[in-house]
């Protein structure tokens, strides 16, 4: 009897301690209210959406609105003060940073070449890729594939994925004008999946069995290879605010850096970066 | 012979038009119909909680439906009085330079592309932020305001047409009975022209509901939940379609775009057909 009581007492004690001992990261939003407006890079959207979902589910007084538009739009809107957080998939350009923007890198993302799953090509070199995008190599046979024309796909100018691809893989060599332009990672994937002669590029996080990522200089583009630095075409994803973030915006950014945030980042296919 | 050929040509044009229309509608129905269901509208949130606003909705287009209805109601309530009043004034005012100028302005306003109206709203906010209202931001109210400017010419033109279609004898008769011009308007002419005016209002509602260019620059976003107030950003069906069909990250999001397209099509069909039913009655 006595032991039972003690046990019950212990249980009651531990139960009362539970909420504080297991306080969730999202609890910092308790008692807060207001709106956080976010715009910018499309690669960030899955992370932002999951964070927003978790915050808005636990606290109905906080609203998070998310718009895309690309890195360029994100930087411009946050500089004008139209949104609280502007996302970019590349570091700020000097012209953008001069508006007093502060950058918060929160994830690492690799950018990989993708081709149709039926394409037998297993690997390419950086030289081959830049020749393909410059229009010098125009048939898959020239890089060890079938006798088929190469159809080029690229992203629009506002894309952060495009800017890291051109900078780190093509080393700023030009992309031929006849390349087809698609507006997002999702659209890129669909285009490649439907066209057996296609070549394009997307975030490593988006690669699934509808497309194939050939090795680049004998390195397989995986999250591990990106994290270790073995795979070179990587970028950081940034949140940017005008001046030091305050209030809800500050809490949101801290939340992205929390364990919850790291989980969302991993689930979206990226590698979390700890706050510097 | 020539007349017969011309008739055949007209018939063929109609047939081509109908074919194109059924292709477009058929495509949306075939792609959109399989997505219809509770999860398209409410995601994984229980329906009752979602409708009562007790729980936020994710991966569903219900917030976009409510957003569209709010922004359209906002636009029509801002536009209805100035639109109809302009129509009445244009019908009965004596010819003057001011009237000519006003007529010209209505025509110009009717011809302004909606993207320009969106840019106007965007510029207005940037201007306000830099001058008298530093906290002004793109919002439901701004979208409603820009949409209102887009539909005011529709309202005034349909009102004017409806009033002009009334037989002259009506106002002569009313004058003979000793009615002042205001009494004629109030008790005879406006009630007689009601059908035409109301169907004009319905057409403007449809026009406002389907416009994307204005709202994408003035406050519509990809993800916001139910509208939180007139100073907040919101989701809307046309923008959801535009956004998810171009920026989709997964097949589910693309399906949502088709579901949203079908829902918007149904919504505007209902409005337009009730407008034409009203006009016929």
Image (tube, rainbow, N blue to C red):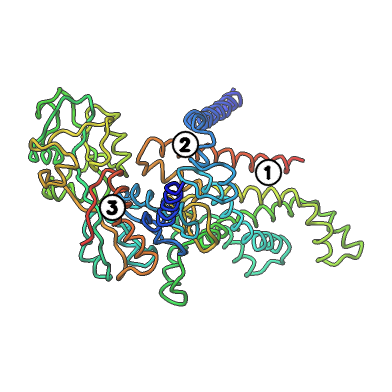
Q: Nearer the viewer, mark 1 or mark 2?
A: 2
Q: Position of residue B66 (x, y in %)?
A: 56, 49
Marked residue chain, label 2 = B
Q: Which residue is mark 3?
A: A158
Q: Are marks 1 and 2 on the same chain?
A: yes
On the question of residue A117 being in view, the answer is yes
Q: Nearer the viewer, mark 3 or mark 2?
A: 2
Displayed quadrant of residue A207: top left
Marked residue chain, label 1 = B
- Please tell me how many numbered marks the rendered image carries: 3
| Gap between marks 3 and 1 measured at Cα | 42 Å
* Residue occupying the point 55% across, 46% down: B65
| Gap between marks 1 and 2 measured at Cα | 26 Å
| Gap between marks 3 and 2 measured at Cα | 26 Å
Q: Which residue is mark 1?
A: B275
* Residue occupying the point 52% across, 52% down: B226
Q: Residue furthest front?
A: A1
On the question of residue B108 being in view, the answer is no
Secondary structure state at the residue bearing disc 2:
helix
- Looking at the rendered structure, which numbered label has been put on residue B258? 2
Secondary structure state at the residue bearing disc 3:
loop
Q: Nearer the viewer, mark 3 or mark 1?
A: 3
Q: Position of residue A245 (x, y in %)?
A: 33, 68
* Residue occupying the point 66% across, 69% down: B96
């Amino acid at each position: 009897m006595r032991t039972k009581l003690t046990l019950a007492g212990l249980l009651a004690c531990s139960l009362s301690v539970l909420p504080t001992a297991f306080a969730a990261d999202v609890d910092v939003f308790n008692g807060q209210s207001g709106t956080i407006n976010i715009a910018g890079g499309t690669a960030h959207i899955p992370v932002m959406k999951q964070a927003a979902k978790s915050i808005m589910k636990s606290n109905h007084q906080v609203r998070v609105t998310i718009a895309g538009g690309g890195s360029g739009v994100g930087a411009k809107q946050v500089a004008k003060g139209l949104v609280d957080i502007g996302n970019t998939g590349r570091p700020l350009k000097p012209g953008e940073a001069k508006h007093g923007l502060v950058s918060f890198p929160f994830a690492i993302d690799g950018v990989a070449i993708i081709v149709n799953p039926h394409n037998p090509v297993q690997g390419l070199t950086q030289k081959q890729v830049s020749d393909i995008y410059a229009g010098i190599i125009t048939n898959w046979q020239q890089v060890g594939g079938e006798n088929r024309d190469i159809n080029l796909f690229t992203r629009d100018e506002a894309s952060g994925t495009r800017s890291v691809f051109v900078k780190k893989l093509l080393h700023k060599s030009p992309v031929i004008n006849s390349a087809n332009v698609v507006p997002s990672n999702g659209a890129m994937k669909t285009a490649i999946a439907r066209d057996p002669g296609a070549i394009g590029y997307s975030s490593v996080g988006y690669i699934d069995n509808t497309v194939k990522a050939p090795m680049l200089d004998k390195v397989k583009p995986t999250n591990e290879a990106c994290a270790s630095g073995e795979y070179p075409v990587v970028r950081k994803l940034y949140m940017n605010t005008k001046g030091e973030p305050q209030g809800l915006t500050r809490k949101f950014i801290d939340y992205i850096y929390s364990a919850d945030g790291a989980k969302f980042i991993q689930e979206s296919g990226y590698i979390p970066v700890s706050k510097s | 012979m020539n007349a017969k050929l011309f008739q055949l040509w007209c018939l063929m044009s109609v047939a081509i038009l109908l074919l194109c229309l059924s292709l477009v509608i058929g495509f949306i129905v075939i792609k959109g119909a399989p997505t219809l269901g509770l999860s398209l509208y409410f995601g994984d949130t229980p329906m009752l909680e979602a409708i009562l606003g007790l729980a936020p909705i994710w991966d569903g287009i219900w917030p976009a439906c409510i957003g569209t209805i709010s922004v359209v109601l906002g636009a029509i309530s801002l536009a209805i009085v100035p639109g109809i009043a302009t129509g009445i004034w244009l019908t009965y005012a004596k010819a003057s330079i001011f009237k000519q100028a006003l007529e010209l302005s209505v025509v110009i306003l009717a011809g302004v592309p909606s993207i320009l109206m969106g840019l106007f709203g965007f510029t207005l906010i940037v201007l306000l932020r830099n001058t008298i209202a530093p906290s002004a931001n793109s919002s439901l109210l701004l979208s409603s305001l820009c949409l209102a400017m887009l539909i005011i010419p529709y309202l005034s033109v349909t009102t004017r047409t409806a009033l002009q279609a009334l037989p002259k004898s009506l106002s002569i008769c009313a004058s003979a009975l000793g009615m002042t011009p205001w009494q004629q308007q109030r008790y005879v002419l406006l009630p007689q022209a009601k059908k035409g005016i109301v169907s004009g209002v319905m057409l403007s509602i449809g026009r406002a509901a389907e416009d994307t260019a204005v709202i994408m620059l003035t406050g519509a976003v990809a993800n916001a939940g139910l509208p939180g107030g007139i100073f907040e950003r919101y989701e809307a069906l046309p923008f959801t379609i535009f956004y998810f069909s171009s920026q989709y990250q997964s097949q589910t999001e693309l399906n949502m775009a088709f579901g949203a397209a079908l829902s918007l099509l149904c919504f505007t069909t209902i409005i337009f057909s009730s407008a034409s039913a009203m006009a016929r009655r």
